[in-house]
Image (cartoon, rainbow, N blue to C red):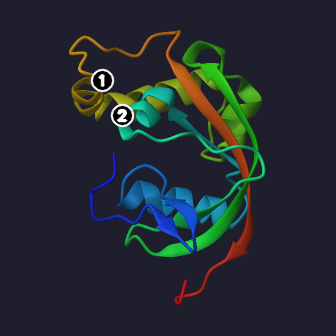
Amino acid sequence: MPEPAEPTTHRGMPAWGFAFPGPLRDELTALALDGTKTATSSLAVDFVVDGAMPARAGDREVLLDSAGQPVAIVEITDIRLSTIALVDDDFARAEGEGFADAADWRSAHERFWNGYIHVLRTGLRDPNFELTDSTVVVCEWFRVVERLGAEG
């Protein structure tokens, strides 16, 4: 979950960044900006804890870098709910992070999500929450429609 100082809107659009500020976000942002990364995933419970709704196809949102600065406007081209066990190889590859298949995607994402599971447990008021085959994942496909300069 992002640090509180990060903006949540820009130009009247939702604003967000991949993962957490730092090297992973920088890498994922670069992959999105060069067109390699065309999909991303989130746990549905992240939206519950944040009191937010997932995007819908056609929505435009602002992508933030590690400094919380806007770097691009992305358009959500498709969004689907899945479970961890049902994410397929095509989606895993669309994430652009070099995953060989869905099993590779799952391993990396469970490692990441388990890194802040205590935050989810607190937000859900469920000390026993765990990732399982049936944990719901929000799968989003997007395209960069505008790169933003230093002025955002």
Using the image, determine if residue 61 lies above or below residue 112: below
Dots 2 and 1: beta carbons under 8 Å? yes
Question: Residue flagged by tag 2: what amino acid is it?
Answer: Val
| SS label for mark 2 | helix
Across and down, in percent, residue 90 comes to: 76, 31
The residue to which callout 1 is attached is 124
* x 30%, y 23%: residue: 124
Using the image, determine if residue 86 lies above or below residue 110: above
Give the camera-side residue of 108 and 132.
132
19 with respect to 150 (left or right) = left
* x 68%, y 62%: residue: 74
Classed neighbour count for the residue bearing mark 2: other residues with Cα under 10 Å, few (<14), some (14–19), many (≥20):
some
Quadrant in the picture for the N terminus: top left
The residue to which callout 2 is attached is 49
Q: CA distance from mark 2 to mark 1?
A: 6 Å
83 with respect to 90 (left or right) = left
Question: Residue flagged by tag 1: what amino acid is it?
Answer: Leu
Q: Quadrant of residue 69?
A: bottom left
Across and down, in percent, residue 65 comes to: 46, 68
Using the image, determine if residue 72 lies above or below residue 27: below
* x 65%, y 43%: residue: 95
Across and down, in percent, residue 138 comes to: 59, 31
| SS label for mark 1 | helix
